[in-house]
Amino acid sequence: MDHSQPQPLDPNDWPEELSGIVKDMQGAPINVHKLMANNPALLKAWWAFRNHSVKGGALGQRNAELVILRVAVQMKSWYEWASHVDRAIQTGLTLEEINCLLKSEFEGNLSPEECSLIRAVDELTSDHQIRTESLSLLEKNYSNPQIMDLIAIHGMYLILGAMINTWGLALDEVVAERISGITDEASFLRAAAAFNH
C-alpha cells in the first residue's frame, strides 16, 4: 500500500473518467483538483457539488465568496485565502471588505445581511450549528435554500482546507501572479494566527 505523500497529478496522467473535469477547467485544473485526482472516484463524485458551490448556489457568488474567505481564515489556509481573494475581487468585493474578514470584529465593513452570514459561518465552525438567534436573523433576508447553501459551502471549504493543510499544497502560479501586491502569505498567516471568534 502506497503511503507516500500525494502530489498534484498532471492532467495528462489523469484517467479518462476525469476528462470532463479537465474540459470544464479549459485544460488547466488547479492544484487542489490535481491533488484530488489521486482519488479519481472522489474527484468525480465531488465535481457537481464543486460547480454548484463555486458559483454560490442560491446564495449567489458574492455571498459565497464572503463565506469561503471566512472559512479560509478559520482554517488558516493560505491557498484557499489567496485563491478566493482573487475570485472575490472579480465578483466586485473591495479589498476593505475582503480584509475585514481577517478580524474577529468585522461589523461596519459589511452590510447587516452580510454580517449575519459571517456570524453564521463562525457559529458553524465553533458550535457545529447556527444558533437560534442567528438563524432568525438570517431568515429575515435569506431563504431556506440559501441557508442550506451557506452550510454546504462552509462544509465544502472545510474539506478542501483540511486537504490543503494536510499535504501543504502550493498556490497555483497564475493565482500568485494575480494577487501579488494585493495580499501575501506572511501577513495572512499572522492575521489567521491572531484570529479568534
Image (cartoon, grey):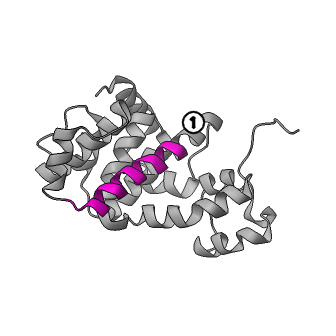
The image shows residue 29 at horizontal and vertical percentages of: 62, 63
Q: Residue at x 32, y 27 (%)?
A: 195
Closer to the camera, 1 or 21? 1
Q: Secondary structure at mark 1?
A: helix
Identify residue for label 1: 165
Q: Residue at x 40, y 48 (%)?
A: 154
The image shows residue 89 at horizontal and vertical percentages of: 32, 59
Q: Residue at x 46, y 37 (%)?
A: 185
Q: Is residue 34 above or below residue 126?
A: below
Closer to the camera, 134 or 52? 134
Q: Residue at x 55, y 38 (%)?
A: 162
The image shows residue 91 at horizontal and vertical percentages of: 31, 64
Q: Which of the image's four quarters has the C terminus?
A: top left
Q: Which of the image's four quarters has the N terminus?
A: top right
Q: In the displayed structure, does residue 32 sit left or right of residue 98? A: right
Is 6 a magenta residue?
Answer: no
Q: How many marks?
A: 1
Majority secondary structure of magenta residues: helix
Q: Is residue 154 above or below residue 58?
A: above
Residue type at mark 1 is Asn
Closer to the camera, 21 or 103? 21
Is 147 a magenta residue?
Answer: yes
**Which segment did they paint magenta?**
142-159
Q: Is residue 134 above or below residue 187?
A: below
